[in-house]
Amino acid sequence: MQKNSLYETDAERNRRLRNDAVRREYLERSNVILSGEYKPHRILSVISKKYGMTIMGVKKILKRDGIYKDANHPVVFSGNGSPTQLSLEL
């Protein structure tokens, strides 16, 4: 659902690029969630600080694209190129 960049304002382009970077970074760090080393909230916290956003802002981006559901069922990168559902028992 990408807009034609010809008609984007600078703010829209910057927002799109930031959101793409947030999605990419979450998927790159998803192996840490799979290993159980860190909880999803910690990863979201690190990403939010890096991009000057709130944790809820990061969650909103990821949820809108189906990359993240909630802390007990984060959708993470499976390593074979497709996101898969992960169920964490707390």
Image (spheres, helix red, strand yellow):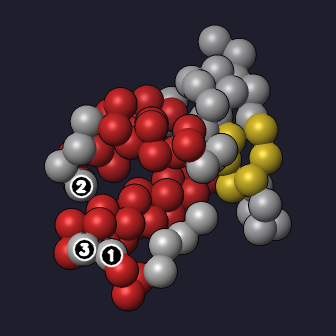
Amino acid found under the numbered disc labelled 1: Glu
Looking at the image, tell me whether mark 3 or mark 2 is earlier in sequence order.
3
Q: Quadrant of the N terminus?
A: bottom right
Q: Which residue is mark 2?
A: 51
Looking at the image, tell me whether mark 1 or mark 2 is earlier in sequence order.
1
x and y percentages locating residue 83 in the rendered image: 74, 53
Answer left or right for 43 relative to 87: left
Q: CA distance from mark 1 to mark 3?
A: 4 Å
Answer left or right for 63 relative to 18: right
In this view, 1 is above or below 33 = below
Element on which disc 3 rests = loop
* Mark identifier at residue 8: 1
In this view, 23 is above or below 70 = below
Element on which disc 2 rests = loop
* Mark identifier at residue 9: 3
- Residue 75 appears in the figure: yes
Element on which disc 1 rests = loop
Is the residue under label 3 in contact with that under label 1 (CB below 8 Å)?
Answer: yes
x and y percentages locating residue 66 in the rendered image: 65, 44
Q: At 20% across and 75% down in the image, what residue appears?
A: 10
Q: CA distance from mark 1 to mark 2?
A: 21 Å
Q: At 56% across and 38% down in the image, what residue appears?
A: 63
Q: Nearer the viewer, residue 18 or 42?
A: 18
